[in-house]
Image: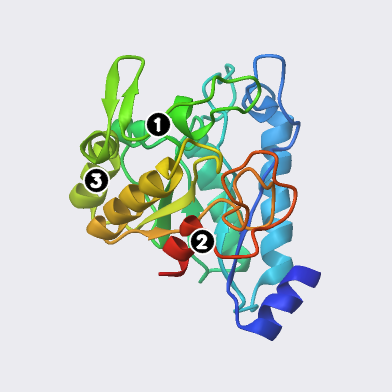
Amino acid sequence: DKALADCEKYGILALVDLHCAPGGRDETTANRMFRERKYQDHFVQVWERIARRYRGRSVVWAYDLINEPLSHEVAEGVDDWPALAMRAIAAIRAVDPDKPIVFEPGPYGDCLNLDHMEPLPVGNVIYSYHVYWPAEFTYQGIRGRPVGIDYPDETRGVPWNKDALRRAMQPAIAFHRDFNVPIYIGEFSAVRWAPGDSAHRWLGDVIDLFEEQGWDWAYHAYREWNGWSVEYDEDPKSTRPSPTPTKRKQLLLE
């Protein structure tokens, strides 16, 4: 509520998402709500409550049902992700019929999953996915991953460059083309300590590809963890924002 008041004050529109699913995760790193129906019922109730709270608030431009749903293990008698999403959308629309709904394919919000689905049978839905390919590059140095991986370069013997990124996006490109639905990149990033200017090069290439398709996008993340921050320089030991704008920050501003 406080964040939305600030957004209204400064003229910023907000996307409200449910970042943690009811029930959390189980030992398989799957969302428990795809193992037990009681959590699915609660998920629908939560969205009805959120919609009731923020209906009529123009500062909220859309509702993102869940961040990176972990829907790869669905128990018997439990809804799969599209079916559960439709239940939540019905609950939202009964209260707040006009706001767009953002749907991330499961699992993990990966665009590969768009290859296996059609749009939901309801209008005013924005389809979203996240971009961190290849993880060996974008996540280097996180949780003990090796560092020193450049871009463009070969990762696990596979060349990664702008053409490779475009090929990785093909399921989303085809989904957008075939069904004429809006696409929103809800997250994309590369750690700031990638060698030299490689994070800047990677960001430039993916943004070019998003713009090439006419997709909307949001960088991950602003003043969250400094590893993703464009305000910090490439030195992993930096503890404060750079006194001069980094090339990555300049890129986003441009």
Q: Is residue 48 visible?
A: yes
Q: Is residue 1 visible?
A: no
Q: Which quarter of the rendering shows the N terminus?
A: bottom right
By what rule are the colours in the image chosen? Answer: rainbow
Spatial CA span between label 1 and label 2: 19 Å
Identified by mark 3, the residue type is: Ile
- Residue at (29, 60) in percent of width and height: 211
Q: Residues within 10 Å of mark 2 (few under 14, many from 20)?
A: some
Give the image quarter of residue 3: bottom right
Q: Position of residue 184 (x, y in %)?
A: 41, 55
Q: Which residue is mark 3?
A: 173
Q: Residues within 10 Å of mark 1 (few under 14, many from 20)?
A: many
- Residue at (66, 83) in percent of width and height: 10
Q: Tag 1 or tag 3, which sits nearer the N-term?
A: 1
Q: Which residue is mark 1?
A: 150
Identified by mark 1, the residue type is: Asp
Q: Position of residue 222 (x, y in %)?
A: 62, 58
Front-lying residue, 220 or 202:
202
Spatial CA span between label 2 and label 3: 27 Å
Asked if residue 216 is positioned above or below residue 31 in the image, the reply reads below
The reply to whether dot 3 and dot 1 touch (C-beta < 8 Å) is no
Indicate the secondary structure of the residue bearing disc 1.
loop
Q: Residues within 10 Å of mark 3 (few under 14, many from 20)?
A: some
Q: Which residue is mark 2?
A: 249
Q: Is residue 220 left or right of residue 162?
A: right
Give the image quarter of residue 197: top left
